[in-house]
Amino acid sequence: MSDRYSAVPPAAPEVSSRTESRRDGSSAAADQVQRQGKQVADEAKARAEEITNEQMKIGAEHVKQIANAVRAAAEELNDSSPLLAHYARSMSSAFCGISEKMRSESPRQVLKNASDYASREPVAFFGAAVVAGFALSRFLKSSSESSSGSFDPRRDRLGDRTTGMTGTRTPATGSQEM
């Protein structure tokens, strides 16, 4: 009696064939989805690398502008403080080198070089980061003020401090017009 209930009847050939057909169709669909997913991921990665490279070029240009500003400051300091001017020129040279590396190397390589330098010279790296951050913030602040045409209400149209009176200052006399 137990043989009768424990035996599993053999599957009909057509049922087995349909099951395998569905399995093959599911597998093909999964493969197609996987290929499409890989293609989308590859396209996204390529676009991210393209954007990163564009941003590196923009960053390199900003670093070059900082180098030029530091070089100009060095020239102004040359007569009054030759030692400080020397350090400023050295810093400007370093910024020029960084700018060139940012243009010529991949973002991954630039980050690796920065990390290696930070490991070897942490104090110098921190100091350079502070100076670069300060210079960049000043540069961005000045460029946003000049591009937006912002007006400082504490100054009149001639760039002088206002006296608190309303009206405009006449250039010839310096007196207030009401």
Image: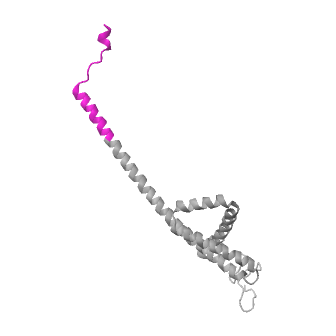
Foreground residue, 149 or 94?
Answer: 94
Foreground residue, 73 or 169?
Answer: 73
Picture residue at 70% right of the left edge, 77% below the top: 86
- Give above or below for 20 relative to 55: above
- Is residue 3 rendered magenta in the image? yes
Q: Residue furthest top?
A: 1
Picture residue at 22% right of the left edge, 28% below the top: 14
Relative horizontal placement of residue 77, taking residue 37 as reference (left or right): right
Q: Residue furthest bottom?
A: 172
Residue 12: name its quadrant.
top left
Q: Report the number of discs.
A: 0
Foreground residue, 14 or 154?
Answer: 14
Relative horizontal placement of residue 135, taking residue 45 as reference (left or right): right
Where residue 93 appears, as percent x and y from the top left, is 63, 74
- Is residue 48 rendered magenta in the image? no
Q: Which residues are magenta?
A: 1-27
Where residue 162 appears, as percent x and y from the top left, is 75, 80
Majority secondary structure of the magenta segment? helix
Q: Residue furthest front?
A: 120
Q: Is residue 145 visible?
A: no
Picture residue at 29% right of the left edge, 37% below the top: 24
- Give above or below for 13 relative to 119: above
Quarter containing the N terminus? top left
Q: Is residue 102 visible?
A: yes
Where residue 19 appears, as percent x and y from the top left, is 28, 31
Where residue 26 appears, as percent x and y from the top left, is 32, 39
Name the colour scheme: one colour
Residue 101: name its quadrant.
bottom right
Quarter containing the C terminus? bottom right
